[in-house]
Image: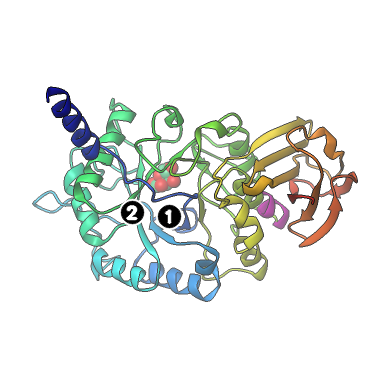
Amino acid sequence: MRKLLFLLLLASAAAFAQKFDGLAPTPPMGWNSWNTFAGNINEQLIKGVADAMIANGMQKAGYTYIVIDDCWESKTRDSAGNIVPDPAKFPGGLKALGDYLHAKGFKFGIHNCAGTETCAGFPGGRGHEYQDARSYASWGVDYLKYDWCNHGTANAEETYKTMRDALHAAGRPVVFSLCEWGNNKPWLWAENIGHLWRTTGDIRDCYDCQGVYDMGWKVILDKQVGLEKYAGPDHWNDPDMLEVGNRGLSRGEAEAHFSLWCILAAPLMAGNDVRNMTPEVRGILTNGEVIAIDQDPLGKEGFRFIENPGKEIWAKELSHGEWAVCLLNAGDNKMEMHVNWSYLSFLKGTYAVRDIWNRKDIGTTKEDFIRVIPPHSVVLFRLTPAP
Ligand code: GLA
């Protein structure tokens, strides 16, 4: 009897303190305001983005979450301590905006911070976690990105657990996106706290530039090596949002960035102005064959198999014995890459080879692959076991 009571107590404690399971069986996809708009956000922009994503095929391609990043808040909480949106930017309030997004078939995401203030200086959640989680639930929020600025001496794991518990107590299922920049190795402790966690500082729209807090996608890519074993359904490494379609990337760099984020099973949060995209950019972001690699139900993150000076081979295991393989010319000059498939020791037997970006079946792994690849660009393959 005592044992039963103990088990019951244990079960109820577990039921209380947990994340909402099953919300991210594959990496979340959507759009986030930060990379392009930073603080220049408002109701019209968000509605316009939603409308555009329906018209341009992004919603159909799987981009579901529309996330308002930093700067949506009023500078101060109201007299009851509630976090409130800036009435000039969001005159209709966030409940109405959430309703708009839901009516259009999207899910509604929002950003705030585990510290006392967000990185842009708006009220943070520290000490208000339960109250804020109730506000988010009342607005219909489905996704919370929770930042790490101004955290003082707080312990990351405990702080994020508090918000996880607050979200759970508020009762509305919310994808919890930890944005702690990898400072405290969240891949070691966040699996039961959130559905995704940032692994690095911020991305910038360049190939390999390096700032104090931000960096190009290639710098971020290198930092993912070895983290693949920590990711899986409902708990993803997040190498930050996409810069596809932003000024600093060439077409080849944008394709490569997108391909490798899919190899990484990264959350695919577009960060460009999707209302004004070139056909090229739209073609990259909505390429269903590339997205299918990211969203493969096996849920395995890919890994770097070979790194020779300037040449890299990345691979991702897919369901049904298939593989995605990505050749990256990481150098600054065009380069001939030669692949003898038998060196890829993870392959078993013969596969049919599809060149995804060229939408062409190009033979089998019995023949070597040789091609000149432009700088900072990729060739992306899907390998299917040959009968
Ligand atoms: C941090 C995050 C970014 C963005 C900004 C907003 O830098 O890492 O993704 O949310 O804050 O201020």
User: Above or below — where is 91 with respect to 112?
Assistant: below
**Beta carbon at label 1 within 8 Å of ligand 1:** yes
**Beta carbon at label 2 within 8 Å of ligand 1:** yes
Residue situated in front as seen by the camera: 274 or 308: 308
* Residue 74 visible somewhere in the drawing: no
Q: Secondary structure at mark 2?
A: loop
How far across and how far down the image is residue 271, in percent? Answer: 51, 56
Mark sitting on residue 79: none
Residue 255 inside the magenta-drawn segment? yes
Q: What kind of residue is marked 2?
A: Cys
Q: Residue at x 34, y 37 (%)?
A: 193
How far across and how far down the image is residue 313, in percent? Answer: 74, 38
* Residue 199 visible somewhere in the drawing: yes
Tell me the quarter of the image containing the N terminus.
top left
Q: Secondary structure at mark 1?
A: loop
Q: Is residue 135 left or right of residue 55?
A: left
Q: Is residue 247 left or right of residue 107?
A: right
Q: Residue at x 55, y 71 (%)?
A: 57
| Residue hosting label 2 | 71
How far across and how far down the image is residue 119, in percent? Answer: 36, 43
Residue found at the far left of this picture = 80
Distance Cα–Cα, label 2 vs label 1:
8 Å
Answer with the quarter of the image where residue 282 lies: bottom right
Magenta span of residues: 251-256
| Residue hosting label 1 | 38
Residue 116 inside the magenta-drawn segment? no
Q: Residue at x 19, y 52 (%)?
A: 134
Nearest to N terminus: mark 2 or mark 1: 1
Contact (Cβ within 8 Å) of mark 2 with mark 1: yes
